[in-house]
Amino acid sequence: MSEPAKGISRADVSHLAGLARIDLSEAELDHFAAELPAILEHVAVVQQAAGDDVEAMSHPVPVNNVFREDVVVPCLTPEEALAGAPASEQQRFLVPKILGED
Amino acid sequence: MTDLTRLSAADLAAKLARKEVSSVEATQAQLDRIAAVDGDVHAFLHVDAEGALATAADVDARRAAGEGLHGLAGVPIAVKDIVATKGMPTTCGSKILDGWIPPYDATITLRIKAAGLPILGKTNMDEFAMGSSTEHSAYGPTRNPWDRDRIPGGSGGGSAAAVAAFEAALAIGTDTGGSIRQPGALTGTVGVKPTYGGISRYGLVALASSLDQAGPVTRTVLDAALLHELMGGHDPMDSTSIDAPAPLVVSAARRADVKGLKIGIVKELGGEGFQAGVSARFHEAVELLTSAGAEVVEVSLPSLEYALAAYYLVMPSEASSNLARFDAMRYGVRVPPAGADDPSAEQVMASSRDAGFGDEVKRRIIVGTYALSSGYYDAYYGSAQKVRTLLARDFAAAFEQVDVLVSPTSPTTAWQLGAKLDDPLSMYLQDVATIPANLAGIPGLSLPVGLADEDGLPVGLQFLAPQQADDRLYNAGAALEKLLEEKWGGPMLAQAPDLEVAR
């Protein structure tokens, strides 16, 4: 199934979707596998822009850790925090089982 | 009688202060306008008539009691659906947040509420702000008030169209790669992306945290300045918020004088790939600035060649990480996989994200996951970050020579709905002029400079300034606006076609 096309194959897309926790359909895998090579080819030009001597810039302004005084301030009530949850029980988020059976 | 919906926010605020009209009247007029035209334009995803009128009545009562009020108190506003509004739906144009009602307000929402601006509702957008046309909204596209078969730009097409269609005088947008400025250009309105960190990001649903910036969407430069001033300034809830005095944008907009101002035309943002009518209106506008005493030179930003590619790596990378929070566990829709008996959390997560995210969001998450994966990180994300450094150096060198830079905001006017939907790369190329400001964290302002000859659609011009020099944008923008309106004999939106009014 994996026909390598300019650096990214259908199997690669399927692997990436797994990492990103998106259950893509077969049709979506076909669609993205056909489309992504052109996009990745376009963005790959960044590799020609700068050598090792150029520093990477993660933020446009210097990012510092910000502290505040250790004082109690109002926060969400349990009811507010849980208001948007798909499921809750006993003031907790109710989630499906974390571990599979097998 | 004056049509209250046609007034600028500044003029309406003055009438409110003089008690010539009430906020309830002004708010009702906007709600009536929304009811009349929004079936067609679809700028709003949610309208809160009751809440808006309640705020308006409260402001009117406080004003009658002689209370000191904010200058914009009582002026209705529309808010992009990416901004958390307590008790009001916030979907980001995504199915995954369908029905989500935030339990808290964004800082900018709190500031608007504290100032007494009635919130009319939430505006449409490309899903999670990913797109340049508002066609990627899960709730259907917004239409351009100038031609309803065309897109209004994106991602903030809803806010721009709301303002252009006189559904509101003020709206909030967010700009990660042009999502305020490009819709401004395509709808003949004003949009400003402030300096990164100039307006709090607390309570904005994050797309790309190092690029995102909220800003004003209006019909006039002064209105943008008034809203910018209201929203801006340091916020301890946002660690990247600038802890320094905010630029004096309102007085700059009132100054409106370009005599002696040094303006640099960005050489790389013009010529090939730019529509003829866009180039023509842009150069005429620059000539007007020259005639008003500005000194215009051409400057080059060589690393712009790589900026778009860098942007389309940085943005998806950060987005893929930010959107990991939509895991169907604490908020958002949960869609169990079909046919699975007692599915695991991971299976539920994957099926919910498949069902809840649209095509463009999935595309960018996959690209971002790729760019951040081990073995590719240095070549893609790392290289893109180096381009940001080169670009910041180019801007710094340019601003040694000139006070502000100018370019067309968008290479083309508004295109037909659907025209670029099947070609994501051609849609990405539309952002070429707007993304450099986000990568470098500098402010940009787009304002309308006329209609293209070939299609009669709005053209926008963009000013760029150094970080924290947002005031220069407002001075130059207001000066150009004044020169153009003298030439046209009124605002450009007066030339927009009348919308059909539903009864």
Image: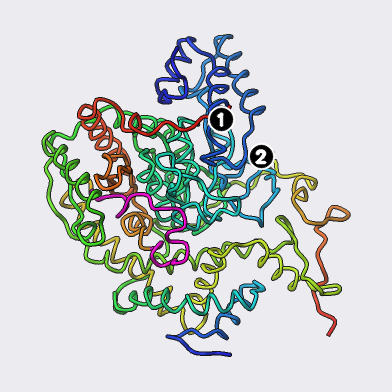
The foreground one among B377 and B28 is B28
Mark 1 Cα shell of 10 Å, populated few (<14), some (14-19), many (≥20)? few
The x, y position of residue A18, in whole percent, is: 64, 78
Relative placement, left or right, of B18 versus B95 is left
Is B151 within the magenta? no
Please report, as a chain letter, where disc 1 is located: B
Cα distance, mark 2 to mark 1? Answer: 26 Å
Q: Which mark, by number, is residue B502?
A: 1
Chain letter of mark 2 equals B
**In front of the other: B314 or B280:** B280
Quarter of the figure that contains the N terminus of chain B: top left
**Identity of the residue drawn at 70% across and 56% down:** B332
Q: Position of residue B4 (x, y in %)?
A: 47, 20
| Residue B55 can be seen, yes or no | yes
Q: Which residue is mark 2?
A: B88
Pointer 2: residues within 10 angstroms few (<14), some, or many (20+)?
many
Residue B42 is situated, as x and y percent measured from the top left of the image, at: 54, 42
At mark 1, the secondary structure is loop
Mark toward the start of the polypeptide (2 vs 1): 2
The boundaries of the magenta stretch are B406-428
Q: Is residue B312 left or right of residue B339?
A: left
